Amino acid sequence: MTRSIFLSLVFHSVMIILTALTLPFMMRNPIDLPPILSVDLIQITDKTNIPYAAKATKILEKIKKEEEKRVVSEQAPPTEKKKEKPDRIPLPDDLNKEKKEIIKKKQNPKEIEEQIRQASEFEKKELFDPNQIAALIDKSKEDTAETLKKSDKLTQSDVKKSFSNALTLSQEDALKAQIFGCWSLPLGLPYQENLLVRIKLKLKPDGTVLRSEVLDHARMNTPGQAFYKVLAESALRAIRICQPLRVPPTGYEKWKDLQLNFDANEMLKG
Amino acid sequence: MKKFIFAIIYLFIFNTSSFALIEVDITRGNLDPLPVAVSPLYVEPGSKEINEDGKIIKNVGEEISKVIELNLKRSGLFNPLKKDSFVQKPDIAHIKPRFEDWRLIKAQALVTGKVSIFDDKLRAEFRLWDTIAGKEMVALAYSTSPNSWRRVAHLISDKIYQRLTGEEGYFDSRIIYVSETGPKTQRYKKLAIMDQDGANVNYLTLGNELVLTPRFSPKNQLVTYLSYFRNIPRVYLLDIETGVQEVVGDFPGMTFAPRFSPDGKKIIMSFAKDGNSDIYTMNLESRVVEKITDHTSIDTSPSYSPDGKYICFNSDRSGLQQIYVMRNDGSNVKRITFGKGLYGTPVWSPRGDLIAFTRVHKGKFYIGVMRPDGSGERLLTENFYQEAPSWSPNGRVLIFYRETKTDSEGKGFSAKLWSIDLTGYNERLIETETDASDPSWSSLLSK
């Protein structure tokens, strides 16, 4: 008997010590790190990146030479123009210098390559910042979590139509009216596309949003559907701005999972 | 006990479906431009000032943010908020914005950044934040020579536009146009080039002869235009960087309405002889000239589709001037406009989905768009006289020119550049030093 009491005391004290040691960690606030600054560095050349019309200029030079040899005729006005060129094209002198420099670069691909290499090495350094990698991993977790979640729930949402809607008309209207005011539609959406974003929400009893997910998540990263991401983001913003949502005071169980279908088609097509 | 277990299992299985998922359709929203806060870029201490032709720019960070703001505002899609209302200072905002402060002034997106000029090198870094979600949306840094600060501002604007609309921007681009001075009866016309926002104007010709319809090459620094040099109207080619000019082809007569092919290798134009004009192309490398249309009517204003496979043009072969589409070899000619009045100056959108045109009906001029098969015609703007639409690089905005009526004394005439987007609501005057006509939008400079 005494032995078991003794054992119990030992185990309990161990437990108490362990909790005393470990729990404060959970109480502590997470360290507020400044966000990791990651940027891509882009080099801009002095002028534009548009290539010279290399072949065309060559031809132009050829013609220039040929025409200098030729007797000036009515059909060859450019030679006359060239003489006037300095007056005709009022370019400052230093611009011409710049041009020569650029031409040098073009003829010397090695020079350019070196520049590019420098830039990319700089980027590499940034990429190997351990903090940043941690951030990347965190990000990917978030993403996968979201994509995993959605898959099985899609089918469920198809079933739901056979059940009657649990919100009364006035309740639904109150919610709609609230979100109408919060949703800034991105202007400049394409007219001929499907502009429906379905968002599933998990709500708290007071109408604040615990979790939100875009149901057609895969479409966000589809090439040529960049507008869809923009639209989805605008819908998510609307939900955040509207928080807490105007939900009925009762029946939490019914509406704790809520799906909002943001449809821009009607607005744009009138 | 068994019953109890069954009851639990029963509840477990059927509980989930006992409440249907409630769906609410949201079909209305705000169509106001998105409120965006563009915080001035923080200038790192010790950065040099920029001397721009004698004008000293002290706070380049603020100047860049102003250019960005104007770009965003002019697009009609964004509403840049007034800087007086900003609570957070640029240096802190760039590291970690206090999103509550920005949400308070109703900003849904925030642009922050910093800029430094050391050793004659400008480095500008910017971040776009979603203030509602409290997330960074895009972050980029540019380095260039200090005098290119405006281009940096345009490139940043393009990135913001792209991230917030899902479409490519159009701010890092230029416009070539015909600058006009003098009374209506005796106009001096010069070729002029400027940034898309009207800055950095440069005149390319002196104004001794009439110049018309300048068009950018989509791929390089060339411009093709019509010049009345020695009173013979012909198509010329001009390298805007070197100033080299040249007449295109050796045609025994008038050539006009030139335009480049999408790959920049050919020029397509009209050639008129004995009162008949047909469409020709000339390859700039091989100099081979090809006749595309062969009809007794006037065929002109050709414009390639972005894939180069089709050409749209206008012709009066049916009696009145209408728009036609054909294959690039001249086969399969199809009329696409059947509305009342005249149709002209067709231009294929760089996206390929639309053709812009000028329509004249009952003495009014309209700029409109339609699909390449002629369906879905939409007239965007109506005026006393306007024509010659040209597409922005992303195919969302059209630039054109508009002339005003002269009064009985011959005064009051003006020609100005205007832009309108595809919604037809966002119509804006583009300020130019002189009167201006025949605008042509370049492709993106950094492509």
Image (cartoon, rainbow, N blue to C red):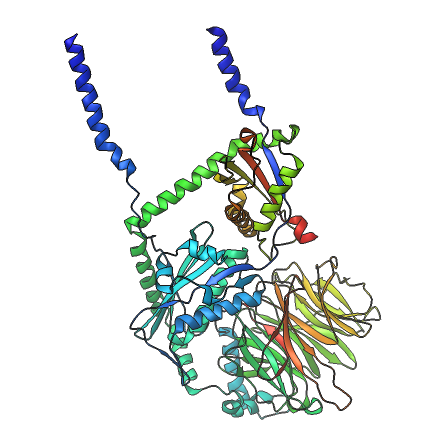
Image mark count: 0
How far from the left and from the top, in percent, is residue B89? Answer: 38, 64
Most distant residue in the front direction: A249
Q: Eyeballing the image, is B104 above or below A98? A: above
Q: Eyeballing the image, is A1 above or below B181? A: above
> Does residue A72 appear left or right of residue B364 in this picture?
left
For this rendering, which residue is in front, B230 or A148?
A148
- Could you tell me which residue is drawn at 52 percent across and 68 percent down? B71
For this rendering, which residue is in front, B68 or B249?
B68
Q: Eyeballing the image, is B354 above or below A211? A: below
How far from the left and from the top, in percent, is residue B102? Answer: 45, 57
> Does residue B224 appear left or right of residue B184 in this picture?
left
For this rendering, which residue is in front, B85 or A259?
B85
Residue B227 visible in the shown view: yes
Residue B172 visible in the shown view: no
- Could you tell me which residue is drawn at 31 percent across and 63 percent down? A118
How far from the left and from the top, in percent, is residue B308? Answer: 62, 63
- Could you tell me which residue is drawn at 50 percent across and 19 percent down? B12
Q: Eyeballing the image, is B174 above or below A140? A: below
How far from the left and from the top, in percent, is residue A241? Answer: 51, 49
